[in-house]
Amino acid sequence: MSRRGAKPDRIEPGVAYTSKEELHPRFGYAVPKTQVAYVRKDLPNCVKKFVLEHELYHLRDKARSWFWREIKANTVSALKHPLGFTLCLFLSLSPSRLRYYARRIKRGE
Ligand SMILES: [Zn+2]
């Protein structure tokens, strides 16, 4: 409930678990404008928890540099879900994930 003259209440983030086909090669995706975090439902549970934490962090982060946003989201999420982070690193060694990272680095996004 918002009070008169106060800032509108913050939108509660939503979570959508989606198929691999919808997000591949991504494991997750955050849309700050709509406050929705998308997470692949086929991932192992500990990785889903890590990815969800990562995407929720992106929803509230205001940093402009994509590289700095990723460092912060990964650090915060890895501290909360170290096993999910570690397994996520191993899963990210696939050729499709490595190509995805190379494209992001090249485009700076
Ligand atoms: Zn990210």
Image (cartoon, rainbow, N blue to C red):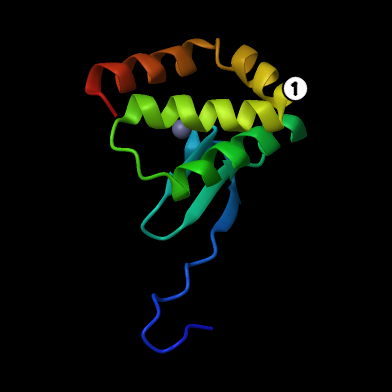
The correct choice, above or below, for 107 with respect to 60 in the image is above
Q: Tell me if residue 106 can be seen.
A: yes
The total of numbered circles placed on residues is 1
Residue ID at (34%, 38%)? 63
Q: Which residue is found at the position 48% from the left and 30% from the top?
A: 72
Q: Quadrant of the N terminus?
A: bottom right
Question: Measured from the top left, where is residue 15 in percent x and y?
Answer: 59, 54
The residue shown at (25%, 16%) is: 106
Q: Label 1: state its secondary structure.
A: helix
Residue 64, picture quadrant: top left
Q: Is residue 42 visible?
A: no
Is residue 4 shown above or below 106? below
Nearer to the camera, 83 or 3? 3
- Label 1 amino acid? Leu
- Which residue is tagged 1? 83
| Residue 65, quarter of the rendered image | top left
Ligand 1 near label 1 (Cβ, under 8 Å)? no
Question: Is residue 17 or residue 12 the one in the foreground?
Answer: 12
